[in-house]
Image (spheres, coloured by chain):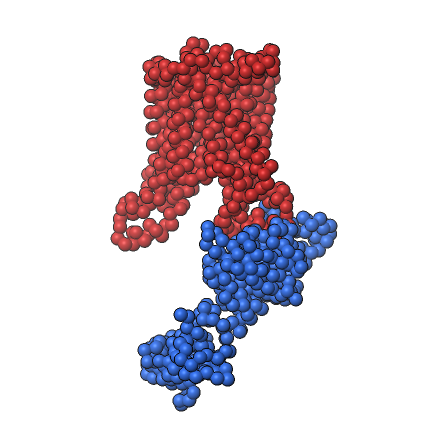
Chain colours: A blue, B red
Amino acid sequence: MIKLSALNITKKYDRAYVLNNVSVYVEESQFFALLGPSGSGKTTLLRIIAGFLKPDSGKIIIGNRDITYLPPNKRNTAMVFQNFSLWPHMNVFENVAFGLRLRKIPNKTIKERVYKILSMVHLADYAEKKPQQLSGGQQQRVALARALVIEPEILLLDEPLSNLDAHLRDELRQEIRTLQKNLGITTIYVTHDQREAMLIADVIAIMMNGNIIETDSPDVLYQEPGCIETARFLGELNEVEGVVLNSENNFCMIKTSIGTLKAKVSSNFAKGEDVIVGFRPEFLYIVSEKTENTFVCEIVSIEYVGSTINAILQSNDQILRAAFSPLYFKMPEKGKLLVSVDPEHIIAFRKKK
Amino acid sequence: MTGLFLLLLIFFLLFSVYPIVFLFWKSTNVSIHLFPIVWSNIAVRHSFINSISLALFVTIAASVIAIPLALMTGFIKIPGRNFWKKAFLLPLIAPPFVSAIGMRQILSRFGSVNLLLMKAGVIEQPINFLGAGLTGIFILQVLHLYPIIYLNMSASLENIEASCIESAENIGASFWQTLRKIILPMSLPGYFAGAFLVFIWSLTDLGTPLVFDYSDLIPVSIFQSLTDIYSNPAGYVLVIFVCIIAIILFFSTRYFLEKISYVGIVRYKTTKEPLSVGKPLRAISLIYLGILLFISILPHAAVILNSFSEKWFLTVLPERWTLHYYREVFHHPIAKISLINSTLYSGIAGIITTIISLAIGFIIYRTQIKGRQILESFVIFPMAIPGIVFAFAFVLVFSETILDPRNFPVFLLVIAYVLRRMPFSARSIMANFQQIDISCEEACLNLGASRWTTFRKITMPVLKNGIVAGFIFAFAFSMMEVSSSLILVSKQQYFPIAKGIYQLAGRVTDGPYIASALGVLGMIVSFIALMMIYKLTGQENVSISV
């Protein structure tokens, strides 16, 4: 069931489109990420949903309610900000209790609910502390508790982890995910970090230049991206230009500078069509004999990362990146390699004219 | 460097700590048994109660005016928002005792307001607006001092992160709830800092009551006691009393501010767009701002009118205009000498203040000398001690010595200016020192530059604005320093502007007009100085300029 829809949202600043006719649909209990580089409009969209900005056109609907012109305090959404934004004059308990006090909930219930949520974020012992006595990670947990305690219909998170160090970020990300699943709260999460989005979200909408270019689950977006921008944004991509030789039964043969490649396609291409063939470094593997989709490469350089062996290879002037399994531990640092990619892992994108 | 450090230590110990310690020692030694006797004096008790109530009511009234003002200019989308934000600095350009001259013209028994009302037939008998003088002092101090609360509170408001307000709205707080529960509590530090300054200023303001010829106040009693400083203990008792109040308030304010200080909160400054509010609220705000500004600059305007009027007596506005009194400024013996003297004294004080501030900044942030942090306390110390107390202590300590202010007051006067302005100038320069990451200097040294080249090419450019602002500040506000000027100087040849204006304003014939002209010149200097400081440093530093 659709819990939140943003319909045809347009927002301009000084005639430049920040959001250009954008629509998103978020299902009940879904963890929905808005992912995009900075300036793509994701925070603007989130702020429109929260009510801090008014769209130039379009509608925001929660459940069946049109809330487009409702002020932020009447929307029953709760937002967690990048900069924590705790109120320094209140202790942790009061920060969290604030929203409940506004709702005139009896003190006893407030106490129960605040302590319940604080123990969920592992801060029950810190209720009497002032925010400034807490670490960044703890402050953000309080902010999270403050948003969750009012049981909002929609939880909005605006890059909540970006001001934390790497270790805390991982820890808190998992906590947010677990909490969201346990509470079943519909959540919209803005981030520019594709790894974070993939790890945390059920569905990711990729935003660029004020548009949503693709919306799907993380694995589909990664493995079968619908457009080359998505593929590029979500990870490293080898791109080789080619021409379609033939195309049938969802497979097509493409002539490229590194040889003829077989690729799986969702819709058939016309013969002779110019395409870009893309495959990820980790889908390359070493083979011992030449079969389908194999090609010979010269090793340019090798880097041992630990979890992978990153290689830069060259095949007929085409530079390719490979991330081999560390199983190939004793790889030669020079010489030739025979490598292959399965057709399922090669995607052909129509070349934009 | 260690030598410089010791020199600074000696300077502060001799001129800042020693006089105050001596004052306390002397008063407890000589006259502690006289305290009850002094207290039993009804006149002393009277001035005591008057002063405390005055300071209290001035602080309350200034708060009532300044808090809505800060909120309106800080948060509401009103036409000309930037103009309004700066306009309320204007009352600060003249010390209240200068505007007092203008105030007398407007509110006295046959002043403009009474004449206007009588002409219009609203009243038949003139109203005594100024009371016995206390009302006039109250009005002037409020009009002069509310900007201090306004500026400090505005600085606090600007530091509130947009998302702190948004998160309140977001979880359901209305505009008024957000204001009450989030915005106001978070602006308390600025409010208290401002309110403290206002209270102490009002409590120790000597110039205004003198111009109104009202003597039932502590500062005036202290001033008068100077003539028989060795025989009359009342002066001691009152000075000690004022000093103790100031110190207690200073430290409790600091303690309180530290307790509610929001340092440590992770901050990523985001500025909040001003709120678009409904038309009624916007209209109310504009009317409020307009009326307040009008009333605030009325005394100043009256001083300006007075300075250009040939005679302003028994008419609503002056009827004939002249530049005569501006010419007189440069010819009249008192006006001329005090103008020259003040420029000189303030210039020297400005230079000394700047050099000492720079030296302190350097020692604290760029050397490892043991105990260097104590300089910071010395710099702040004069903030806790009212000017009138310093001046009194100087008279007490240095009388009958080579520095006796009755013979040659210039030296001590300049020192008093330096000490009084030091907290602000030094902190402005020190703040700049803090801005320079030491690794920027190390990078320069590392590339082969000498320490001196590094200071010139890397450190100085960053400090430049702070130094210039510090100098202008010390200069301009020394020109307008009142209590030390009035207390330390008695010989006409050494008069600074404040003393000149006071003497002239008390004369019957052309005195007040020349005093007004002098006052206008002072206002122009202060105005230019404020604008320059504003340009050089941005608003935050102006907010400490009081």
Report the residue at 50% width, 75% height from top.
A223
Decide which of A164, A34 is in the foreground and name it.
A34
Where residue B395 appears, as percent x and y from the top left, is 43, 21
| Residue B174 visible, this orientation | yes
Decide which of B171, A305 is in the foreground and name it.
B171
> How many numbered discs, if any?
0
Where residue B455 appears, as percent x and y from the top left, is 30, 45
Report the residue at 71% width, 48% height from top.
A104
Q: Quadrant of residue A65?
A: bottom right
Q: Is residue B450 left or right of residue B46?
A: left
| Residue B97 visible, this orientation | no
Q: Quadrant of residue B70?
A: top right
Q: Is residue B17 left or right of residue A22?
A: left
Q: Is residue B448 above or below residue A23?
A: above
Decide which of A223, A11 is in the foreground and name it.
A11
Q: Quadrant of the C terminus of chain A?
A: bottom left
Where residue B329 appears, as percent x and y from the top left, is 36, 17
Decide which of A103, B207 is in the foreground and name it.
A103
Q: Quadrant of the N terminus of chain A?
A: bottom right
Report the residue at 61% width, 49% height from top.
A71
Report the residue at 47% width, 32% height from top.
B87
Q: Is residue B544 above or below residue A81?
A: above
Q: Is residue B287 above or below residue A30?
A: above
Where residue B407 appears, as percent x and y from the top left, is 36, 17
Q: Is residue B360 above or below residue A338?
A: above
